[in-house]
Amino acid sequence: MLSDPIVALATPPGRSALAVIRLSGVGAFAITRRCLRPFHPDRPRAAWRAQLRHPASGELIDEVLAACFPAPHSYTGHDLVEISTHGGLLVPAEAVAALVAAGARPARPGEFTRRAVLNGKLDLLQAEATADLIDAGSPAQRRRALQQLDRGLSARLAALRAELLELEALIAYEIDFPEEDEGPVSPARVTAAWRAVRERIAGLLATAPEGERLREGALLVIAGRPNAGKSSLFNALLGRERAIVTEVPGTTRDAIEAYAVIAGFPFRLVDTAGLRASDDRVEQIGIEVARQYLGAADLVLFCRDAGCEIADVESERFVAACQAPVVEVVTKVDLAARSPDGLGVSVVTGAGLEALRARLAEAAFGRLLALGDVEPVVTRARHRAALERALGEVDAFYVAREQQVDAVAAATHLRAAVGALDDLIGAVTPEDVLDRVFASFCVGK
Ligand SMILES: Nc1nc2c(ncn2[C@@H]2O[C@H](COP(=O)(O)OP(=O)(O)O)[C@@H](O)[C@H]2O)c(=O)[nH]1
Ligand SMILES: [Mg+2]
């Protein structure tokens, strides 16, 4: 059922000062009344103290704080109750069990937000942003999610949608009077309107690579010859001693991956085995793994040892073959007699590390940095697919005009483009799409 009362713990189980329980649906207040004394549905959105008791045994489970949110002014759009209990493993679980005994059903993951979407409280993009906000591990992810939650992307799509409908209106005369040669709207004006909307869609699509990278974290692979200082730099960027550092070349054999926030942006940092010809079987495998990571990298950080005069032909050749952009850095500048050409760092003195962080953020997220936090950005494959579809239809419209296809047929492409944007916002969303969006949500959200 889409409105039956559901209940869930909205905070993670474990030792904590407080826990929050949510209960929502038609009949949520009647269920709560069986467990809470006193109960004040007449005081909306104001918290009061109450005793929470089991509805059958009457046993006191906790002293709680409760607040009612009558429909439609609630997160879900249905009657909703939020109860703050003491934390820990037992009390919140018993409180939820009491509410289930009183008639509520345990909620499925994302079910509250799903109802919010079905009741028109949030659109699908905002629902996704809610999950992104919870999953945010870096300030840039938080800002982006908040902007999307604030309808940043939704508003842009609504504007695009309006532009498409205006474009359709421009050719309405041709639709109504197909026999006339010259309508009141010049073809040049139609072309200009087409170009404007096309460029806006393409501009939004261009944010997709970095937008999706922002959700996943940029895969940053550190490469260079053995002993170049890769693991030292990996640790420095991570802020903890994760990889083993020694003066023995070939220490790192396995690739080590760790999440790091660099200049406010999310990265998946990978330290790899140094690139060189080796007879050691384990090291060979490590080098092969390094190559695979380099093949998948969004960005490569290539380390060159300041003290090392020998040309590193092997690595040079390899980096030249890299698909991903490469940031080159000279390591161990504290040991060098003169300052290096290009970006130099030392993990001993800390020199150059801030500049390196800024350079990495710029290289992986330069477009987002340039856009700032106001411009909307596309952050999921779902968004990209819908916009590509819209763009394809808008271009098909233009081709149809060029080929003098009749206006009614040309207009169907604009309708299809509007449909793609509607799917994206979630105007009407099929069950399976909702299932996919909410599959990754936590229970209680
Ligand atoms: N003086 C100095 N030594 C460094 C610096 N970075 C790394 N080293 C030393 O260089 C050696 C190799 O470092 P490591 O990070 O293991 O290099 P990797 O083989 O590329 O991972 C170790 O003895 C480190 O202590 C640095 O910035 N300054
Ligand atoms: Mg190493």
Image (cartoon, rainbow, N blue to C red):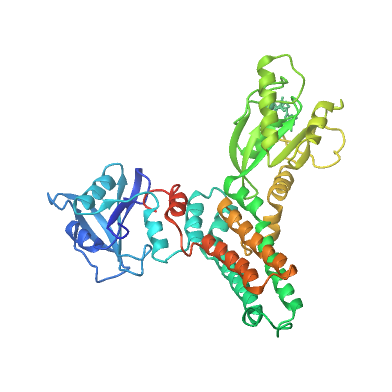
Please provide percent x and percent y for residue 189: 73, 78
Occupied quadrant, residue 357: top right
As displayed, is residue 275 above or below residue 295? above
Is residue 75 left or right of 405 when viewed as pictured?
Answer: left
Extreme front residue here? 179
Q: What is the number of callouts on the image?
A: 0
For the N terminus, give its image quadrant: bottom left
**Residue 118: image location, x then y, percent:** 40, 62
Residue at 71% across, 19% down: 248
Foreground: 192 or 251? 192
Picture residue at 46% right of the left edge, 59% below the top = 429
Quarter of the image holding residue 103?
bottom left
* Residue lying furthest left: 57
- Taking the spot 71% from the left edge, 70% from the top edge, the residue there is 401
User: Residue 387's spot in the image, x, y percent?
Assistant: 61, 59
**Is 120 placed above or below 63 here?**
below
**Quarter of the view holding residue 445:** bottom left
Q: Is residue 222 visible?
A: yes
Residue drawn at x 23%, y 62% is: 27
Question: Residue 26 appears at what percent x and percent y?
Answer: 27, 63
State left or right for residue 433 relative to residue 415.
left
92 or 291: nearer the viewer: 291
Does residue 200 show up?
no
Ligand 2, by image quadrant, is top right
Farthest residue toward the bottom? 184
Q: Is residue 142 left or right of residue 314?
A: left
